[in-house]
Image: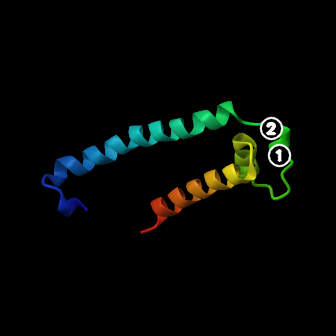
Amino acid sequence: MAEEVRHPAVQVPQAMVYSIPLGSLSGLLFLLPIVFTLPDIPTLLAVPGGQPTGPMFTLIMGSKAGGFGLVSTVAKLFKQVTSN
């Protein structure tokens, strides 16, 4: 990727440095709504599978369809980011 920019010695390190605050900001924007709408902790810890993400999104969205939509969106973004 460094060969595809005009000034790789300058632009690639800048992109690496800018990715930290941008990633922090996007993570904060994702986590803040979840934290403010988070159900009680004992309910999340009592989930049979041990992974409270699905039930948490279902409780937050108020329906199974909304929870499934949010979980599938997060999973799709995760897959897209981690794939080659």
Identify the residue position indicated by label 1 in the image.
Answer: 45
In the picture, the disc for residue 72 is: none
Residue at 83% across / 51% down in the picture? Answer: 47
Residue 13 lies, in percent from the top left, at: 26, 47
In the image: residue 67, left or right of residue 18: right
Q: Quick one: 35 or 20, which is closer to the camera?
A: 35
Disc 2 to disc 1, C-alpha distance: 6 Å
Amino acid at pointer 1: Leu
Residue lying at the far top in this picture: please name it: 36
- Callout 1 secondary element: helix
The reply to whether discs 2 and 1 touch (Cβ–Cβ < 8 Å) is: yes
In the image: residue 46, left or right of residue 66: right
Q: Quick one: 79 or 69, which is closer to the camera?
A: 69
Residue at 33% across / 41% down in the picture? Answer: 18
Q: Where on the picture, by quarter, is residue 8?
A: bottom left
Residue lying at the far bottom in this picture: please name it: 84
In the image: residue 65, left or right of residue 2: right
Q: Where on the picture, by quarter, is residue 31?
A: top right
Residue 55 lies, in percent from the top left, at: 76, 50
Identify the residue position indicated by label 2 in the image.
Answer: 41
Residue 49 lies, in percent from the top left, at: 81, 59
- Callout 2 secondary element: helix
Q: Where on the picture, by quarter, is residue 6?
A: bottom left
Amino acid at pointer 2: Ile
Which quadrant: the C terminus?
bottom left
